[in-house]
Image (cartoon, rainbow, N blue to C red):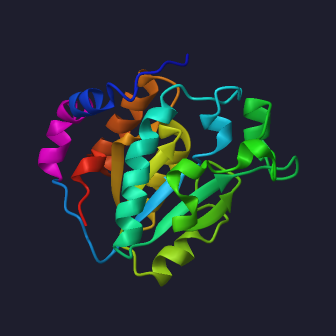
C-alpha cells in the first residue's frame, strides 16, 4: 500500500506530469493568487509521518519537505499568515479515528512533534483531533481575523487531512489552492484520486513553484 512515488530526484518530473493530467481543470479555473488575502496551511508534518521508524511513515513525505519549507519562507518573509496543524488525540477525543485506525497520535508524544525542517517557528500552531483542520479549532477565526480569502494546502495525508480540510475550507467560502508537490500520502493512486476530486469541485491544483507573492 505504501510507495515512494515522490523522491527528491523525481518530484519535479512527477509533479509536472500530474499537473499536465489536470490541465482541463486548470483551463476552467486558472490560478490567480490573492497576494493580500492568502495564507499557507501546513498540515500534520509530524514525526509520526516523517520518521522512518514510525508505523505511520509515508515514504513520499520526505520529498515534499523542501517545497513546503520554501513556501513557509516565502509566506513568512512576505508577512502572510502561515498555519501549522498538529494532529493529536487522546482516548477521549479520538472518536471514530481511534476505532477506524485502532491507534492514535498521542498528545504530547515524540511522534506528535512537527519536524523542524518545515520551520514551525515561522507560523502559528493549531492543534486538531480530526481530519478537518477547521473542526472544533480556531482556524476559521484566525483566518478571518487576518482577512484571508484564499488558502494554500500543503502537508499530509493528501487524501485524508489535506483533502478534508480543502473541502471544509471551500464550504466556508475560501478559495482553495491545492499543491500537487506539496502534499503526500501512502501511494500514487490515493494522491491522484484526491487531486481529481479537489480539481473537479473544490480547488485549483498547483505546483509549489507557481505560487508567487
Instruction: Tally the marks.
Output: 0
Q: Residue at x 54, y 76 (%)?
A: 142
42 displayed left or right of 96: left
Q: Residue at x 72, y 47 (%)?
A: 112
Image position of 144 with respect to 18: above or below: below
Q: Which residues are magenta?
A: 18-29
Assess whether residue 190 is covered by the magenta stretch.
Answer: no
Q: Can residue 174 be seen in this snapshot?
A: no
Q: Quadrant of the C terminus?
A: bottom left
Q: Nearer the viewer, residue 17 or 202?
A: 17
Q: Can residue 147 be seen in this snapshot?
A: yes
Q: Nearer the viewer, residue 143 or 84?
A: 84
Q: Residue at x 40, y 81 (%)?
A: 147
182 displayed left or right of 29: right
Q: Measured from the top left, where is residue 129 in percent x and y? A: 71, 53
Image position of 66 with respect to 132: above or below: above
Q: Measured from the top left, where is residue 197 in percent x and y? A: 37, 39
Image position of 144 with respect to 54: above or below: below
Q: Measured from the top left, where is residue 44 in percent x and y? A: 59, 48
Q: Residue at x 51, y 66 (%)?
A: 122
Work out which residue is located at the far right of the displayed protein and give it.
92
Q: Measured from the top left, where is residue 60 in percent x and y? A: 48, 28
151 displayed left or right of 53: left
Q: Quadrant of the N terminus?
A: top right
- Main SS of the magenta part reads helix
Q: Nearer the viewer, residue 50 or 21?
A: 50
Looking at the rendering, which quadrant does residue 18 occupy?
top left
Amino acid at each position: 500500500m505504501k510507495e515512494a512515488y515522490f523522491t527528491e530526484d523525481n518530484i519535479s518530473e512527477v509533479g509536472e506530469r500530474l499537473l499536465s493530467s489536470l490541465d482541463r481543470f486548470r483551463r476552467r479555473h486558472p490560478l490567480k493568487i490573492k497576494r493580500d488575502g492568502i495564507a499557507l496551511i501546513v498540515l500534520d508534518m509530524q514525526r509520526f509521518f516523517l520518521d522512518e521508524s514510525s508505523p505511520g511513515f509515508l515514504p513520499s513525505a520526505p520529498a515534499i519537505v523542501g517545497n513546503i519549507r520554501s513556501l513557509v519562507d516565502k509566506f513568512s518573509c512576505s508577512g502572510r499568515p502561515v498555519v501549522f496543524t498538529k494532529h493529536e488525540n487522546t482516548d477521549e477525543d479520538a472518536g471514530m479515528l481511534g476505532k477506524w485506525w485502532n491507534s492514535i497520535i498521542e498528545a504530547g508524544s515524540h511522534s506528535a512533534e512537527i519536524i523542524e525542517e518545515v520551520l514551525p517557528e515561522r507560523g502559528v500552531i493549531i492543534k486538531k483531533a480530526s481530519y478537518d483542520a477547521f473542526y472544533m479549532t480556531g482556524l476559521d477565526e484566525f483566518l478571518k481575523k487576518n482577512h484571508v480569502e484564499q488558502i494554500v494546502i500543503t502537508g499530509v495525508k493528501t487524501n485524508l487531512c489535506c483533502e478534508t480540510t480543502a473541502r471544509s475550507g471551500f464550504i466556508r467560502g475560501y478559495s482553495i489552492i491545492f499543491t500537487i508537490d506539496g502534499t503526500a500520502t501512502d501511494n500514487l493512486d490515493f494522491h491522484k484520486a484526491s487531486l481529481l476530486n479537489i480539481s473537479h469541485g473544490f480547488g485549483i491544483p498547483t505546483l509549489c513553484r507557481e505560487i508567487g507573492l
